[in-house]
Image: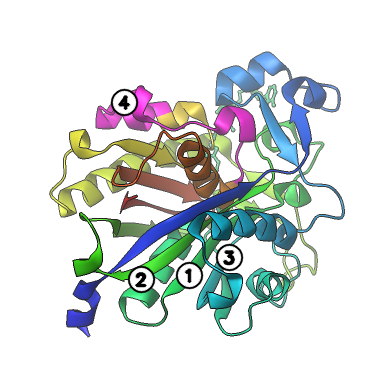
Amino acid sequence: MSGTLNLKRSVIVGCGGYLPEKVVTNHDLAKIVDTSDEWITERTGIRKRHFAAKDQPTSELAVKAAHVALQNARIRAEDLDLIVVATATPDRTLPSTAVIVQGKLGNNKGLAFDVAGVCAGFLLALNVVDNFLKSGQGKYALVIGAEAMTSLLDMGDRRTCVLFGDGAGAVVVEAKNRDDIGGDRGVLGVHLQSDGHLHNILYSDGGPSTNGKVGKLRMDGQEVYRHAVTKLTDSAKRILASHELMVDDIDWFIPHQANIRIIESVAQKLKFPMDKVVLTVQDHANTSAASIPLALWVASAEGRVKAGDLILHEAIGGGLIWGSALVRF
Ligand code: UT7
């Protein structure tokens, strides 16, 4: 088995994204809660976000992003062996959102399932898919981060409702033989970790087996912030060291987009220049599992991130669960 593991690489061959039509600015939110554009911009970097329509479930956002990624990869949905959706806002408690997406895409030959890693969900899904593909369980996979975060927001709680937005991002990943790849492309490695002692600093206060409700998102923002800066810095240092890479070797830092201050603090601690950091938080706010693939889609569509570039990703979310990934695009 280990021989097989070393022979394959999971290469991103197409990116896609979707943002719902409705744009909500900080000024719009200031009309419904006691907040201001100044506070939100200064504390988070967020200026606007997209809200899904009432009749737009997460699977619909995911399918729209998936179509773009499949088109860019020139892969047909029927050919997918794996569809993995990272989401904290599933359409239903069961079945998984991934099988709903699979049905909507018209695929019935592959395996579809969800992963629950909240804001770190995309990296978790990428890690799972990478291991499936490297062990020979399929050739083409679709990895989606999709969230209708507004379905979890308490619009009366100014500490949380200004921070999140809706959207979906997707990548098509292909298992390639290392000998066939020009250069050293693909997922080089993922580091993920969790600490369940911290499950109560970022959570939904509902659940099927607790109170039978969906619940609303609750967060001790300062605590999450504190853990985010130290844990993300530690994870990045760890993955770079394990691949014998230096910060200078990285072409782009594409982190989870929760708060510009967290991103800047981590970049500063890593001595990573901000002009090589992809930022979408100002336009999308925190879209949880969707934020990394959305940022990757934006940066690749703009021609900033190119084939062969070495990307450092990282994310932290409710759990707490956090980690980083090294991907040569
Ligand atoms: O995806 C991963 C999950 N989430 C995160 O990464 C979020 C991590 N945490 C954060 O980004 C920051 O902690 C927040 C943006 C959530 C909050 O920023 P902060 O600088 O930590 O503010 P704070 O919680 O210390 O609140 C400062 C003040 C408080 O007022 P008092 O007690 O000083 O009078 C809050 O009540 O700001 C007040 N406040 C607001 N004021 C206007 C809190 N939310 C708002 C608001 N508008 N929306």
Sequence-wise, the earlier of marks 4 and 2 is 2
| Left or right, 140 with reference to 184 | right
Q: CA distance from mark 1 to mark 3?
A: 11 Å
Colour scheme employed for the rendering of this structure: rainbow
Q: Are there few (<14), some (14-19), or many (20+) residues within 10 Å of tag 4?
A: few
Circle nearer the N terminus (1, 3): 3
Badge 2 amino acid = Ala
Residue at the spot of label 4: 268
What residue is at 52 percent from the left and 54 percent from the top?
72
Note whether 235 is above or below 32 in the view shown. Answer: below
> Is residue 285 one of those drawn in magenta?
yes
Say which residue appears at 25% left-offset and 62% top-offset. Answer: 181
Residue range highlighted in magenta: 264-287
**Chain-order first, disc 2 or disc 3:** 3
Q: Position of residue 139 (x, y in %)?
A: 41, 76
Instruction: Give the labeled residue for mark 2.
Output: 175
SS of the residue under disc 2: strand
| Disc nearest the viewer among 1 and 4 | 1
Front residue (pair 283, 156): 283
Question: Residue 127 lies in what quarter of the image?
Answer: bottom left
| Residue bearing the label numbered 1 | 141
